[in-house]
Amino acid sequence: MRAKRVIPDFFLPFAWDPGGNFFGLDLRDESVAYYATDVFNPKLSDAENYNSAQRRVAKSFEHFLEILEPNPDESW
């Protein structure tokens, strides 16, 4: 994904959702982000695409673990 410039070098994925999007560590500040892989816009720069694809979900990995909730669908 890095070689194809889908995710930036500063993003370390550790999980993904069924749609192929990632949860990962932003190595710049150690926050956890959700990273959508299907929002690439060829008219934008890589930096602008990376910014629009990433949503911060927790201030740290520890915080991410603290705010996790059980899956209400017990069939998983």
Image (cartoon, rainbow, N blue to C red):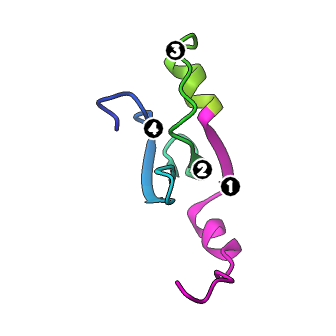
- Mark 2: amino acid: Ala
Q: Secondary structure at mark 3?
A: loop
Residue 31 position, x and y percent, is: 60, 52
Residue 57 - label: 1
Tell me the mark number nearer the camera, choosing from 4 and 2. 2
User: In whole angstroms, how far apart are the C-alphas of marks 4 and 2?
Assistant: 11 Å
Mark 4 or mark 2: name the one nearer the start of the chain: 4
- Badge 2 local density, few (<14 within 10 Å), some, or many (20+)? many
Q: Looking at the picture, which amino acid does disc 1 mark?
A: Val
Residue 4 as seen in the image, left or right of residue 33:
left
Q: Which mark is residue 33?
A: 2
According to the picture, the residue beneath numbered tag 3 turns out to be 42
Does the residue at mark 1 contact the one at mark 2 (Cβ under 8 Å)?
yes
Q: Residue at x 45, y 38 (%)?
A: 10
Under mark 4, the amino acid is Phe
Asked whether the residues under the numbered discs 4 and 2 touch, taking CB atoms below 8 Å apart as contact, a structural biologist would say no
Choose the circle earlier in sequence order: 2 or 3.
2
Q: Is residue 37 magenta?
A: no
**Residue depth check, mark 1 versus mark 3: number of the one nearer the observer:** 3
Please state the extent of the stretch shown in magenta in the rendering: 53-76
Mark positioned earlier in the residue sequence (1 or 3):
3
Q: Earlier in the sequence, mark 1 or mark 4?
A: 4
Circle number at residue 10: 4
User: What whole-number distance in Å separates the C-alpha atoms at marks 3 and 4?
Assistant: 21 Å
Q: Are marks 1 and 4 in contact (CB under 8 Å)?
A: no
